[in-house]
Amino acid sequence: MILAVLFANAEGNILIERFHGVPAEERLHWRSFLVKLGADNLKGVKNEELLVACHKSVYIVYTVLGDVSIYVVGKDEYDELALSEVIFVITSAVKDVCGKPPSERLFLDKYGRICLCLDEIVWQVRRHTEQF
């Protein structure tokens, strides 16, 4: 299952977050953990180069797209391979909406459409998971 999808800017500020099945008291931990993970590892990474981490029996796949960092967190059947497919779909959707890898300003200008695309992607993934 996909637990979280987060977008952050270069300073570590969360731009979009979607949590699924994560208790409210754990969300702050995940926010700070993911931002720190990105700060430690995303410097100098090329656009769409995937990085993988494992924490507390969950998998994290993350990347940079323009000025935005993207994190996808999953567990069980959503291991690093499945999450890499999900993050590929997400990055493709963001590039389609923005027309290119986004600057932070362009990302925020297209915020509404990106949220709609993200919600649709996550809904499709969750629906697919429930069928099997």
Image (tube, rainbow, N blue to C red):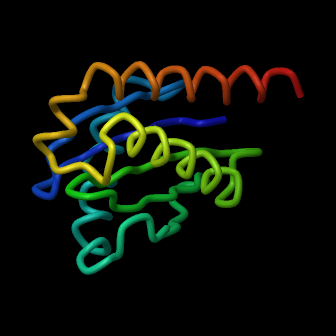
Residue 64: x and y in percent read 33, 61
In the rendered image of this protein, does residue 106 appear above or below residue 38? above
Residue nearer the viewer, 123 or 56: 123
Q: Position of residue 131 (x, y in %)?
A: 86, 21
Residue displayed at 47% across by 38% down: 93
Task: Look at 60% across and 20% down and name the residue there.
Answer: 123
Residue 106, by quadrant, is top left
Q: Residue visible at 30% across and 39% down?
A: 98
The image quadrant of residue 67 is bottom left
> Relative to the observer, which residue lies in front, 30 or 44?
44
Q: Looking at the image, how many numbered discs can be counted on the residues?
A: 0
Quarter of the figure that contains the C terminus: top right
In-front residue for pair 50/39: 50
Q: Is residue 24 above or below residue 81?
A: above
On the image, the x and y values in percent for residue 56 come to 54, 55
Residue occupying the far right of the picture: 132
Location of residue 2 (image quadrant): top right
In the rendered image of this protein, does residue 119 appear above or below residue 1?
above
Location of residue 1 in the rendering, given as x and y in whole percent from the top left corner: 66, 35
